[in-house]
Amino acid sequence: MSMAQAAMSADPLLPRSRMRPAATLLAAAAVAAMAASTGAAAQGMPAPSPNATLTIGIGVDLDTVDPAQQTTTTVQNVLDYGLQTLVAFDTQGKIEPLLATSWSTSKDGLTLTFNLRQGVKFHDGTPFNAEAVAASLERLIGGKVKVPIGAGFRTMKSIEAVNPTTVAIHLKNPDPNLLPNLSTTMASVFSPTSATKDGNSPTNIVHPVGTGPYQFTRWTKGSEVVYTRVEDYWGKKPYYKTVSFKVIPEANSREAGLLSGQIDIVMNPPVTDLAALSANAAVKVLKAPSDRSVFVAIDTTKPPFNNEKVRQALNYAVDKSSLVKNVMFDAVNVMDSPFPSSLSGYCKVGNYDYNPDKAKQLLAEAGVKDLKLTLAAPTGRYIQDIQFAQAISGFLRKVGIDAAVRTMDWPTYVSAIQQKNGPFDMHVLGWAPGALDGPTQLQMFTGSTIPPKGLNTSFFSDPTVDKLTAEAALNLDDASRNQQLCQVQKTLWQQAPWIYLWSQTLVLAYNAKLAGVSYLPNEKFVTTGVYPTR
């Protein structure tokens, strides 16, 4: 039985499902769970290699290796090699067991109880147990650790280690989205013993020690992150002895490394070359669905961007369809809502059609002329990021706005965009909710998630949005909850704290001799189970 079949037979919660009182979600078969944890195929995989290295090219450096403090899916993909969570998504977006074997919800919906996998050890040899789970999850709500993507865990009131193999999460209110949020990297479980070793402190992890098939070895900032296979791993042992993540911001350089054989897998190769790569017998291309929105966040606290008309003008000034065709090469889809269509609660709102005359009119009504601004963009984090930022600058120039484009390395960039009254008026960013749910998307728009409490880097706050978001988070009725979320989306579309751009796909290019490359629908690639076919 496949993992997906096992998970379906266990009747797991879907990301869009509500909490089921007193429902116990049984574990899938242990063998299937172990196979899924490495992404390995049950058949055809050769014996683990004593020395082989898998090399993966990524576009940005890590901002941190602390699972609670990281801010983006690319970093999560790296950390997931060594860290694991209680539950996980499968490729269909269904929740499946991982470090938990089963779970149940109390009748009142206020306690979520997990039965833990036995016989699992952390990489430092200490046992995985309920105390470790409680210590790891407590960091998300204790107030001592900065958790930029932590809004989905605020419903947790306390975590109780009932006994070594049972942990209970007590909630402030029933929360239909907590279970999928517990599948995200922020909720990873690491060794409590390691929290004061190898440079670690309880509030800042620099050497993560988890339960995954690989253990963290070293991080050379701006260059490389290395993981080494765990020989006594509790699940199916992966083929490669070592995995090296190479930090290569330029997409063309990542592609060159792939074609020369120096790199085995690359994330986001040049979209201009996708057709040629697909036709190359030595390469395979995977275009995976994703829940990522890519946008330009506008600092709504800075005049004149605190004026709704100015923000709307910016949306009308940018020809998104032209960008998609000529810069993105049809690899993305124009947004028609603040939500990508894959999220629970999505509703189609409309379009900001390209209308430079309308943009000029709105700017005039706002009393704005000869506007100069700074537009920041990363290089290598998103498909064609610096290229489309420069093209946006060109469109803004046509309506009388002088937009200077700046770029920098990813860790510095992340720090800069979280500064109120920081160096940028607008900045390119992407957001992919790990839990595939609407409320997680709304972390980017609520007053409670303005930095340093979250990643609402447009510093936007609106009482209607905050009120409806809070109400929807507590609403267990799908129909009325979706109505609330739809109203939020309509309000956000009008308020325009972003220049709404597109939904991005996850593109991987890899050596055709590899098997086992897969993905999750929350923009994560699954490559721990990769192996050579010949």
Image (tube, rainbow, N blue to C red):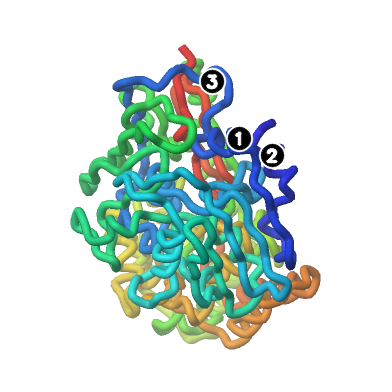
Left or right, 140 with reference to 30: left
Query: Looking at the image, is 218 positioned above or below residue 368?
Result: above
* Residue 32's disc number: 1
N-terminal of the pair, mark 3 or mark 1, is 1
Disc 3 vs disc 1: Cβ atoms closer than 8 Å? no
**134 relative to 306, above or below:** above
Give the Cα separation between the discs numbered 3 and 2.
Answer: 36 Å
Q: Amino acid at mark 3?
A: Ala
Residue identified by numbered label 2: 6
Q: Is residue 521 visible?
A: no
Looking at the image, residue 279 lies above or below residue 85: above
Question: CB under 8 Å between callouts 2 and 1?
Answer: yes
Which residue type carries mark 2?
Answer: Ala
Q: Secondary structure at mark 1?
A: helix
* Type of amino acid at the residue the image marks with label 1: Ala
Q: Is residue 378 above or below residue 247?
A: below
Crowd band around label 3 with a 10 angstrom C-alpha radius: few (<14), some (14–19), many (20+)? few
Q: Residue at x 31, y 61 (%)?
A: 413
Element class at badge 2:
helix
Nearer-the-camera pick, 58 or 225: 225
Query: Disc 3 designates what residue?
Result: 279
Front residue of 377/229: it is 229
Look at the image and tell me in which quarter the N terminus lies.
top right
Where in the figure is residue 95, as x and y percent of width and height? 63, 51
**Is residue 41 in sight in this rendering?**
yes
Name the residue located 46 percent from the left edge and 69 percent from the top edge.
150
Q: Earlier in the sequence, mark 3 or mark 2?
A: 2
